[in-house]
Image (cartoon, coloured by chain):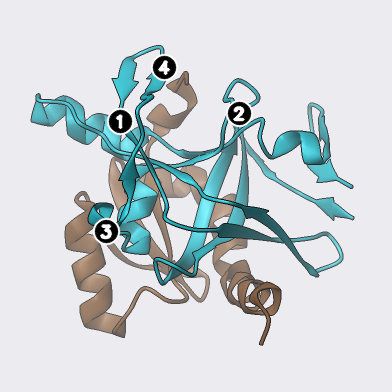
Chain colours: A cyan, B brown
Amino acid sequence: MQINPAREEKQIRLLSFFSCFKLGVGGPVYFLIDTGASRSLLSERDARILGIDYGRLELQKEPLVGLGGTLPVYKTPGECSLTFRTSEQKGHVESFPHFDVVRVEIEDEKKRRLVFNLIPSLIGMDLLPRFKFYATRDVAYLER
Amino acid sequence: MSAVSVGLDRLNELEKSREYLAKNLPILMKNYPESYVAIADGHVFLSDPDLDCLLQKVRERRGSTEGVLIEYITPKQSKIVI
């Protein structure tokens, strides 16, 4: 079984259908494959598109640490799943007991808007080791 | 209907739009720089620099965001380091 991520310039992204039954949300999300991220996470931009209410999420003690600083991370109240389309046009689901959702809290509105628009959702090392991950000059895919 | 078939149906519904986005990203970068675009049935039908404004327009037009791929278009994406 293969899942083919799209290679766009210097990024490798994967379209999935994100769903969280407990939050009553579901919709398409592009995830950037990031081998430097210890955990997968949903960006505030995608959380907004999905209609996630931060009041129903639990604030985590540990913030997200990146090169640009730290951002608060919230946890979904229940299981979330990502459905992928395989190269055989079948569905493949990966489940998570909960999912991290980041929030952009920066005082300067211009900077906040820039970071909000640019931070993508990530697939990190909690999911990637479940697959073989191939990335060459021309193609990239996950395989199991 | 199982979760996997619901998710797959929704992804199949978006396939035309996903292909459109992959093929036309350089054109979209020229036409909609620093803007959100809403893509359905393989074409851009709305755009706005502000996400909340775009979501409102999409809901007014279609009732919901179901079957719509929403993407932020910027050449700056390649400069992100996470």
- State the image quarter where residue A43 is shown: top left
In this rendering, position of residue A1 left or right of residue A114 = right
Q: Are marks 2 and 4 in contact (CB under 8 Å)?
A: no
Determine the chain carrying the residue at label 4: A
In the image, farthest residue toward the bottom:
B1
Determine the chain carrying the residue at label 2: A
Residue at left 85%, top 52%?
A2
Residue A15 lies, in percent from the top left, at 60, 54
Dot label at residue A72: 1
Q: Are marks 4 and 3 in contact (CB under 8 Å)?
A: no
- State the image quarter where residue A24 is shown: bottom left
Residue underneath mark 3: A53
Mark 4 to mark 1: distance in Å?
11 Å
> What amino acid is found at the position of numbered circle 4 in the picture?
Gly
N-terminal label among 2 and 3: 2
Residue underneath mark 2: A34
> What amino acid is found at the position of numbered circle 2 in the picture?
Asp
Mark 1 to mark 3: distance in Å?
15 Å
Mark 2 to mark 4: distance in Å?
12 Å
Mark 4 to mark 3: distance in Å?
24 Å
> What amino acid is found at the position of numbered circle 1 in the picture?
Pro
